[in-house]
Image: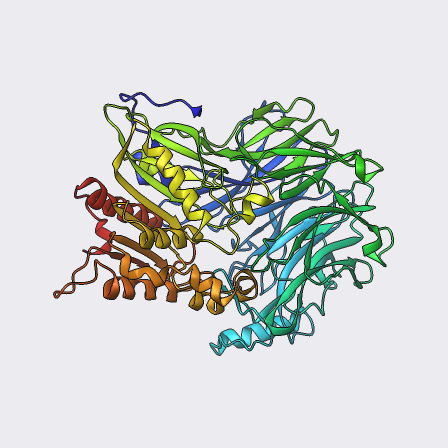
Amino acid sequence: MAILNPAIPGDQPQTPFHDLDHYLSIPRVSGLALSPDGSRLVTTVSTLNGKGTEFATALWELDPAGQRHARRITRSAKGEAGAAFAANGDVYFTSARPDPDSPDEDPVNALWLLPADGGEARVVLNRPGGVARVLTARDADAAFVTAEVLAGSTDEEDDARRRKARKDNKVSAILHSEYPVRYWDADLGPGQPRIFAVEPGEDKGPGRPTTVDAAAPLVLRNLTPGAGPRLREAETAASPDGRTIYTSLTKPLARADSRSVLVAVDVASGSMTVLLDHEGMSYFPGPVSPDGRTLVVVSESDSTPRQAPEVKLHLLDVTNPADGTARLQPLAHDWDRWAKPAAWLPDGSAILATADDDGASPLFRISVPASAAEVSVSRVTQDAAAYTDVVVSPDGRAAYALRSSYAFPPEAVRIDLATGETTRLPAPAERPVCPGSLRRIAATARDGSRVPAYLALPGEASAGSPAPLLLWIHGGPLASWNAWTWRWNPWLLTARGYAVLLPDPALSTGYGQAYIQRGWGAWGKAPFTDLMAVTDAAVERPDIDASRTAAMGGSFGGYMANWVAGQTDRFDAVVTHASLWALDQFGPTTDASQYWLKEMTEEMALENSPHLHVEKISTPMLVIHGDKDYRVPIGEGLRLWYELLSKSQLAADADGQTAHRFLYFPDENHWVLQPQHAKVWYQVVESFLAKNVLGKDVALPPELGL
């Protein structure tokens, strides 16, 4: 057992986790961009607005040397995000704040520029359909954006006319010819994604006012006019010289199936070349080497009902676009982790990557020698933290990243690549103090596998005053409890006196391919027995009260909470959020049926479906679902609720009363994103747990109108 952060003494002042309003007001850091000369870092910080109803984002500049305080560099009610440095040090970003030069126009997400010399930010490109993302080349004056166009539009002006006609006539209908039609929480179409080059436009003629700071107008050139809807959610990378864009393209297949192929787009001509396209495999671009000759490629094999997917890294020589297969070289294929490539070292000698690894997501160095057989993987960071958004200094001596763990939320750090030492950079806010201690525990599964978990303990937990236990089951299921989460934050309930158990059962990432395969196609077997084994290990501790326990989970974790409720009565309460209930119903109705239906046969789905065990459920359940959830459609929650009330052992009585509860969000999706709804979520969960686990009455939020 390892103690990863110290306990807080019982007389310690209350932490931000003791008050939901205080918790919601903690600044949230995301994204990281480094200037070409390595002198500036820019991140995005989200904070609660004055009414407490929305999160507003802003760009902040950090000092890579760690000497100067962080400073805010943008400010507006609409917020800013997506920072990208141009080669000359200017910062591009996107924002829906009004254009000062066109204050009467409806604001959309436009492309803005903040000059390197410190001038005021200005709109450099605005279009009715908005801009989704900006991408720049490292060594060239080249910028690209992804944006949506209506399929029948001939140019930008025609697209604007068509959009206006739909808006004026209040038409929202969408005619589809390909699958899928929605994604997570968004209806797809009628706009289709395209990649555009951002280029200087023509002067509009005489009489145009000019000043010493006037900038040439910018226009978009469509690089992918024939891509259809197939660039949605595409991974994209630009060559350092800005001459080539590498992107994944969704290829439709028979029977509503699809896979991702890798293509190269020549910026000068707009021609598109397919580099990698193989049956049963999807390909995604990683970073391009400093000399522009080699592309890191991520491959993911199609899953089958008997075989989990495998994720591998490759190197692709892109000097000759033809016959990419011949020049695709394996990279660290003996390394049993699912790596996420982040950046090349400037001399091209190695690639930095992150990967889930035993409850952390460290930074790794993968050497790139002449012979693939000589490739070696070494761990750079040694702490039990998760690293994301990795960028490398121009001299290759340091990397910068966002680091988090269950002890602290994401924060920017500098990493010495020679020693692995990390230094926290001056941040927009200090770390919040957590109300307890974090420990690493493990159990042994039936097949002898180690089942690890984090345990967040309240500071007052002891043998004389054991804490009630909450088993939290992660989503995915191909995921790991290894990084800070704002949505499922254990410290909010640890502050209420609960111990929170965060296990990684079979199917979790970070423990090798065999650990995933243990639970593949059999969700109700090894994942379930692993969870019970690690729960048994936790309640054996003298500071845990085995007589007061509950199980909770969201998405796959919600599925597993439903399964737990139908398999055992050991828990006093079960909370199930955005959960899969009837797997035969879920498969064809989720937003990504083409993936799900490869994972289980109809027989396997029924064998692992919680709804077939509803008559055995004797534990009070809190069902939570958002109506705009397309990944786990609302039908799952509605059917679960009806069958709990009509078939479970706690079915509604003669007066229609039940111990079960259903928290419904008409305008939320798979996640609960609105701040006040997140507050209601935690308050209802706390009240439900207090009643059923502690035997206490805790008031429900008055906003529910009860």
Number of numbered discs present?
0
Q: Position of residue 558 (x, y in %)?
A: 39, 53
List the single residue furthest toward the right: 320
Q: Quadrant of residue 221?
A: bottom right
Question: What residue do we see at 54% from left, 70% from top?
Answer: 181
Q: Quadrant of residue 456?
A: top left
Question: What residue do we see at 53% from left, 75% from top?
Answer: 174
Q: Is residue 265 left or right of residue 590?
A: right
Which of these two is toward me, 106 or 16? 16
Question: What residue do we see at 82% from left, 59% from top?
Answer: 268
Q: Does residue 72 sit above or below 607 in this rendering? A: above
Q: Is residue 447 left or right of residue 513?
A: left
Q: Position of residue 486 (x, y in %)?
A: 42, 42
Which of these two is toward me, 589 or 139? 589
Question: The N terminus is located in which quarter?
Answer: top left
Which of these two is toward me, 681 or 395? 681
List the single residue furthest toward the left: 655
Q: Position of residue 385 (x, y in %)?
A: 53, 32
Q: Does residue 371 sit above or below 76 in this rendering? A: above
Residue 618 in view, yes or no: yes
Q: Position of residue 484 (x, y in %)?
A: 46, 38
Tell me how the rendering is colored: rainbow
Q: Is residue 682 left or right of residue 524?
A: left
Question: The C terminus is located in which quarter?
Answer: bottom left
Residue 118 in view, yes or no: no
Q: Is residue 548 left or right of residue 188?
A: left
List the single residue furthest toward the front: 447
